[in-house]
Image (cartoon, coloured by chain):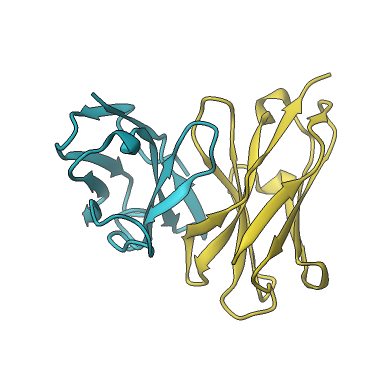
Chain colours: A yellow, B cyan
Amino acid sequence: QITLKESGPTLVKPTQTLTLTCTFSGFSLSTSGVGVGWIRQPPGKALEWLALIYWDDDKRYSPSLKSRLTITKDTSKNQVVLTMTNMDPVDTATYYCAHVRDGYNPAAFDIWGQGTMVTVSS
Amino acid sequence: QSALTQPASVSGSPGQSITISCTGTSSDVGGYNYVSWYQQHPGKAPKLMIYEVSNRPSGVSNRFSGSKSGNTASLTISGLQAEDEADYYCSSYASSSSVVFGGGTKLTVL
């Protein structure tokens, strides 16, 4: 059974860097074809794709946020970490990590974490 | 990279069928058969309902079906049930090696 869980601060100040951790079980990020992505959702708004990392350390980023995002993996800990720099109140959202169903189709996330709400405020 | 275009809301009565459209460009929806659909109930994480345009994951009701024509993908729900009331999002692989979501559609079962 695949599970994912996000963790990190619930409140960050403007200009600070956000670090979120996705801890997963039921699969290995060292297995060919496996990927984990991050998606966020501001309150009452739509989903927005942020980044994705594959088993071979291939990394993909949202073009509009690429300069602010870094995604890494720690295979031994079964974790994926997302950092986002220069946080702004508009970045207030629920942040989800999710398992990619197939390595060749990055748009299909079949298992999602419960999400973690991050508020950006001074 | 712009969000895919979905109607803000659709509605239907129990037992009826509804269709939600998802319009993109030749750089995303029209260029790849990597369109997915998600269902999201209030306060819950999204659930994958359709992948690769028309495939259903195990456990998803066959009342849900997907299709694509040109730059527009569609999700059809037949035999509407009260539990289908939720927000629905489409997503697609895009030529920038990224993923784009739609703006979401609120389905109301009357």
Considering only vertical position in the picture, is A69 above or below A104? above
**In the rendered view, does B42 fall on the left or right side of A71?**
left
Q: Is residue B32 visible?
A: no
**In the rendered view, does B46 fall on the left or right side of A56?**
left
Residue name at image x 51 percent, y 28 percent: A45
Q: Quadrant of residue A37?
A: bottom right
Quadrant (top left, top right, bottom left, bottom right) of the C terminus of chain B: top left
**In the rendered view, does A118 fall on the left or right side of B49?**
right
Residue name at image x 54 percent, y 57 percent: A111
Q: Is residue B2 visible?
A: yes
Residue A70 percent coordinates (x, y) = 75, 53
Residue A26 percent coordinates (x, y) = 65, 69
Considering only vertical position in the picture, is B31 above or below A66? below
Q: Nearer the viewer, residue A5 or B20?
A: A5
- Counting every numbered tag in the picture gives 0
Q: Quadrant of residue A121?
A: top right
Residue closest to the far top: A122
Residue name at image x 52 percent, y 25 percent: A44
Residue A8 percent coordinates (x, y) = 80, 42
Q: Quadrant of residue A100?
A: bottom right
Residue A33 percent coordinates (x, y) = 56, 76
Residue closest to the far left: B16
**In the rendered view, does B73 fall on the left or right side of A13?**
left
Residue name at image x 82 percent, y 67 percent: A77
Considering only vertical position in the picture, is A61 above or below A14? below
